[in-house]
Amino acid sequence: QVQLVESGGGLVQAGGSLRLSCAASGRTFSSYGMAWFRQAPGKEREFVAARWSEEGTFYAHSVKGRFTISGDGAKNTVYLQMNSLKPEDTAVYYCAAKSGRYSIDYYYTSQYDYWGQGTRVTVSS
């Protein structure tokens, strides 16, 4: 079992930055794919970024060049550095973990086995 706890959300002005953290407990996440998703009010949950130990990192087109996913194995923590934030980035951000092998369908929520409770990010214009 893996437990995921997100933190770091908040209110920020457009153009600002935030860093989200996802602390994993239970089994270590070195053998997992880790990802961030987000869900805006009235919308479906959507892929933001994913990180795999061998395959590398992947980003949604809407955040590429602005967001960076990284990890600290010693702390069992995954981060999402968000720069140049826009009002359309406003959402609840969720951390997710996928056990087992890499999947080319990494952008689907159904691929992930564990989810955090979410942290809210609000970007004001």
Image (cartoon, rainbow, N blue to C red):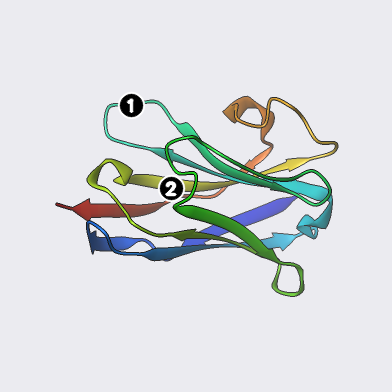
Residue 122 image offset from top left, x and y in percent: 26, 53
Tell which of 25 and 31 is nearer to you.
Answer: 31
Residue 22 image offset from top left, x and y in percent: 57, 60
Count of numbered circles in the view:
2
Tell which of 51 and 10 is nearer to you.
Answer: 51
Tell which of 17 and 90 is nearer to you.
Answer: 17
Residue 43 marker? 1
Disc 2 and disc 1: Cα gap in Å?
Answer: 13 Å
Pick out the residue farthest to the front.
65
Name the residue type under label 1: Lys
Q: Residue at x 45, y 65 (%)?
A: 19
Determine crowd level at label 2: few under 14, some 14-19, many 20+ residues with C-alpha closer than 10 A.
many
**Image vertical order of residue 8 relative to residue 2, above or below:** below
**Image vertical order of residue 67 relative to residue 99, above or below:** below
Q: Residue at x 42, y 37 (%)?
A: 62
Q: Are marks 2 and 1 in contact (CB under 8 Å)?
A: no
**Image vertical order of residue 113 relative to residue 108, above or below:** below
Element type at mark 1: loop
Which residue is the site of mark 2?
A: 93
Residue 124 image offset from top left, x and y in percent: 17, 54
Which mark sits nearer the N-terminus, 2 or 1? Answer: 1
| Left or right: 31 as drawn, with respect to 35 | right
